[in-house]
Amino acid sequence: MKSDYILPFTNETEDQIVFQNPWHSQLFAITIQMSEKGNFSWKEFVEIFGESLKKQRSLSKNLDGSNDYFSCWLNALEEILIIKKISNQDNLVLIKEEWTQAYLSTPHGKPVHIKSRSV
C-alpha cells in the first residue's frame, strides 16, 4: 500500500526513501527526533552538516551518498551535541568504544546491547 505521508525535512514520501544500511536510517531518525524535541534547530544542524560535507569534499573525496555521506551526517550530529553541551568528546569516544565492544561480542543475528553504565 502506497503511503502519501511526507517525511519531515524532505519532499519525499515514505515509499520513496531507501537507506542502504540500517545505521543510516537510525542516524536520520535520531537526528530528526532530537531536533523535534528542541535540542537544536533543523537550521543549526543543516549548517553544521553542510560544513561537514564541505570538509569531506575539500579532502578530494567524492561523496556517493552512502557511508561517506552518513559519516558526514554523524560528524555533524556529534559536533552539534558538543556545541549544545548535550555531550562532550570524551563521552562520545567512550560510547563508540562500548558500542564497538558490544558489536564484536554479540553473536551474529542477535541484538546488540551496550552494557549498563552509570554516567
Image: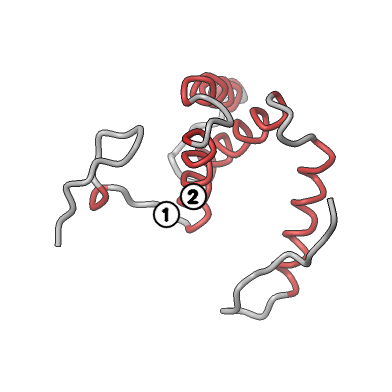
Image height of 27 relative to 8, above or below? below
Where's the N terminus, which quadrant? bottom left
- Categorize mark 2 by other alpha carbons within 10 Å: few (<14), some (14-19), many (20+): some
Task: Say left or right for 96 vs 51.
Answer: right
Give the x, y percent position of residue 106: 69, 76
**Residue 58 or residue 99, whichever sits in front:** 99
Query: Are dots 2 and 1 in contact, CB under 8 Å?
Result: yes
In this image, 104 relative to 90: left or right? Answer: left
Label 1 residue SS: loop
Q: Is residue 90 above or below residue 48?
A: below
- Residue drawn at x 58%, y 27% is 56
Decide if residue 49 is on the left or right side of residue 11: right
**Within the image, what quadrant is residue 104 found in?**
bottom right
Where is residue 6 drawn, in percent x and y? Answer: 24, 41
Amino acid, disc 2: His
Q: Which residue is mark 1?
A: 20
Q: Tag on residue 69? A: none
The residue beneath circle 2 is 24
At 49% from the left edge and 49% from the top edge, which residue is drawn?
24
Residue type beneath disc 1: Gln
Pointer 1 local density, CA inside 10 Å: few below 14, some 14–19, many at least 20? few
